[in-house]
Amino acid sequence: MIQRVLRRSSARDSQTGGDSDANTAVRLDGVTHSYGSAGGRLDADRDPTVIALRDVTLTCDSGEVVGLEGPSGSGKSTILHAIAGLLVPTTGSVEILGTDITRLSDHERTRLRRRHVGIVFQRFHLLPSLSARANVALPLVQAGVPRSARRERATTLLSDVGLSGRATHLPSELSGGECQRVAIARALATDPDVIVADEPTGELDTETGSTVLELLTDVGSDRAVVVASHDDDTLAITDRVVTLRDGSVMLDEG
C-alpha cells in the first residue's frame, strides 16, 4: 500500500518573485515558440520552420493538477519543457513562483529548476548502473546535499512510494511501474514546488498506471502538477484539462 506521499517536509524558501498571485505556481503568458532549421530559439530575421506553441497563456496553482491534452505535435511536451526551463520560448513569459525564467541566465534557470521543479518522464530516464536509492538521490548530489542526508531522504521517499524493499535494486531488476515510482520519488527529492510529468503512464499497464495516477494525485495536494497525456484515465484525475491543437490552447476547463 502506497503511503500518503510527502506533505511538505519543510517551510518553503521565500518565493522567488512577488508579482504573481500568492497561490499561482506556474504562469505562461503569450508564449510562442518556433524552431528553425537548426532548432532552438530563432533569430529575428529568420523564417521559422515549425511553430510549436502559438500565444499560449495558462496557469497552474499550488495544490492543482492540470492536464494537457492533444494529439502528437500539439505542443504538450514543449509546454512542459518551457515550464521546466529546458527551453526558452521565442516570445512570451514563463513564471515559476513569480519569477520570469525567460529573463534568467542559463545558470540561473538551471539553479531554479533544480530547486523548484521536478520532472517525470514517460521512459523513466533512470541511470541503469545506479540502484533505485542512488537514482532518487541524484538530484541531491547536484544540490550538494551531504551523503548521509541524501541516503536518508532517498530511503524515506522510496518508502513513501511503496518501494522500501527495492532500494538496492537496479532499474533492470524493477518492473515498469516500480521504475516509474522511482522516477516520481526522484522528482520529489528536492521537495519541489512544481512537478511536470510527460505521459507518466504511457509505458504501463492499466493496473500499474492506476497506482502511478494515485501517487500523482497525492503529490498534487500541495504542489502544482502539470501532466501531459493522451490517456483518458490520466486526464480524469486532473482538476483541469487544457486542450491543445497545433500549438494553441483550444479549451481550458475544470
Image: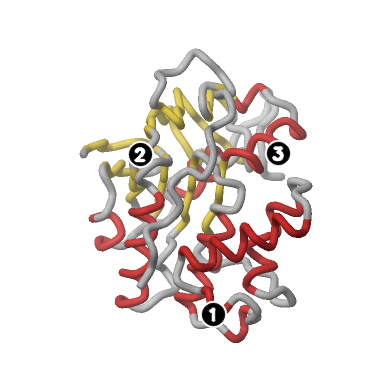
**Residue under numbered circle 2:** 63
* 67 displayed left or right of 6: left
**Helix or strand or loop: what does disc 1 sit on?**
helix
Q: Residues within 10 Å of mark 1 (few under 14, many from 20)?
A: few
- Residue occupying the point 38% across, 30% down: 59
Q: Position of residue 245 (x, y in %)?
A: 34, 44
Identified at 61% across, 40% down, the residue is 35
Marks 3, 2: nearer the viewer: 2
* Kind of element beneath mark 2: loop
Q: Which residue is mark 1?
A: 165
Q: For the residues marked 3 and 2, what is the alpha-carbon distance in whole angstroms?
A: 24 Å
- Numbered mark located on residue 110 in the image: 3
Residue 165 spot, x, y in % from top left? 54, 80
Indicate which label's residue lies in the foreground, 2 or 1.
1
Is tag 2's residue or tag 1's residue first in the polypeptide sequence? 2
Could you give the CA–CA distance between mark 2 and mark 1, rounded to whole angstroms?
30 Å
The residue type indicated by label 2 comes to: Gly
- The residue mark sitting in front, 1 or 3, is 1
